[in-house]
Amino acid sequence: MRCFVNEAGTIFGNLLHSWRKPAGEMREGLEIWVWFRSVAGKQGDEMDQAGFSKTAVLGAGVIGASWTALFQAAGCDVAVYDPDPDTEDKVRSYVARAWPSLEELGLVKGRPGALRFCTSAAEAVAGAQFVQENVPEREAIKHALYAEIEPALEAGAIVASSASGLTLSQMQGGWRDPSRLVLGHPFNPPHLIPLVEVMGNAKTADGVVEAAEGFYTAIGKTTIRVNKEVPGHVANRLQAAIWREAIHLVLEGVASVEDVDKAVAYGPGVRWAAMGPTTLFGLGANGGLEAFLAHFAEVFNGWWDDLGQPKMDAQTIQALVAGLEAALEGTTQEEQSARRDALLLQILKAKQSGG
């Protein structure tokens, strides 16, 4: 399998310069689709590692560094770009911390891929067949980056954006030919959380979405297909919905930030780690989902009618910050992150062994 990780820092350092750059002549061909289709049913070590080994990561913050660790673990060479002068130290440190978890999950596939750091985004994408873009969610920044890298891309290379807020249509505006751009939205941290939301549209060339899905599956991810463009895609909308009600309960004095979080983490959150909500409710009554809803449809209608509509204004933010500080009792963000990752590792191992 050939991978290419490209971190889009080039554009940060010279946004205006990037805006002025001509997009250049597009090269055609999507040889990568043909290869991926020929191996679509293979995963991990079963894949031909020699066939797709170069990747690029553009933007090396937390998300980009996490992708870098995963791509390296899969045996892909990774070229990273970010304008931060401390990028190399930060990314190498992140990869070192992530590596034991990747090994424990069986995601390290033989020899780690080579890691190099580039002085521009164009340099990083040169020769790459798969580029993961993680630059800030500002349309102008993404468009300037795309204008810089488009002339330097390999024929048939795929560019996947980690964007959580911008839509694919908005991002396509930065391309002369957007046919090789897809949404490849992960959940943080990407090297641990399996989900990637993948989307193309009418401007996406045939086979590109399938090729992206094949690549992600080969490196251990679980993909879903987003069929219709909506702000926030799928998973972010789901977590936004539950957080909205969590905030409402806090503001109404029903429970503290700490206790609302406990209600999720030690209640439905435990079940959601096993199965999704509709599947779980289908287990809630003899006779399946139809029998369950015969009893509870009106109950849910009543709950939905009573759900809150809080706004993230200054007062709400202050209430949440104060509530979280009280719940954490002085533990640091680093300590909380380590605890999260340790728990996630155990949950993922349990899911692996339990199917």
Image (cartoon, helix red, strand yellow):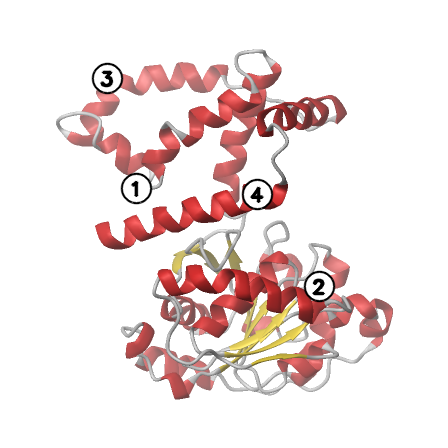
Q: Nearer the viewer, mark 1 or mark 4?
A: 4
Q: Secondary structure at mark 2?
A: helix
Cα distance, mark 4 to mark 3? 44 Å
Residue sticking out furthest to the top: 253
Residue under label 1: 274
Local packing at callout 2 (Cα closer than 10 Å; few below 14, some 14-19, many 20+) is many
Residue under label 3: 295
- Residue 180, compared with residue 252, is above or below; it is below
**Residue 149 lies in what quarter of the image?**
bottom right
Position of the N terminus by quadrant: bottom left
The disc, 1 or 4, on the residue closer to the chain's N-terminal end is 1
Q: Nearer the viewer, mark 4 or mark 3?
A: 4
In this rendering, position of residue 40 left or right of residue 239:
left
Local packing at callout 1 (Cα closer than 10 Å; few below 14, some 14-19, many 20+) is some
Residue under label 4: 335
Name the amino acid, label 4: Glu
Cα distance, mark 1 to mark 2? 36 Å
Q: Residue 220: x percent and y percent?
A: 37, 64
Name the amino acid, label 3: His
- Whether tag 2 and tag 4 are in contact, CB under 8 A, the answer is no
- Residue 96, compared with residue 253, is above or below; it is below
Q: Secondary structure at mark 1?
A: loop
Q: Is residue 164 visible?
A: yes
The disc, 2 or 4, on the residue closer to the chain's N-terminal end is 2
- Whether tag 3 and tag 1 are in contact, CB under 8 A, the answer is no
Local packing at callout 3 (Cα closer than 10 Å; few below 14, some 14-19, many 20+) is few
- Whether tag 4 and tag 3 are in contact, CB under 8 A, the answer is no
Residue under label 2: 142
Residue for point 73% across, 55% down: 138
Local packing at callout 4 (Cα closer than 10 Å; few below 14, some 14-19, many 20+) is few
Which dot marks residue 197? none
Name the amino acid, label 1: Ala
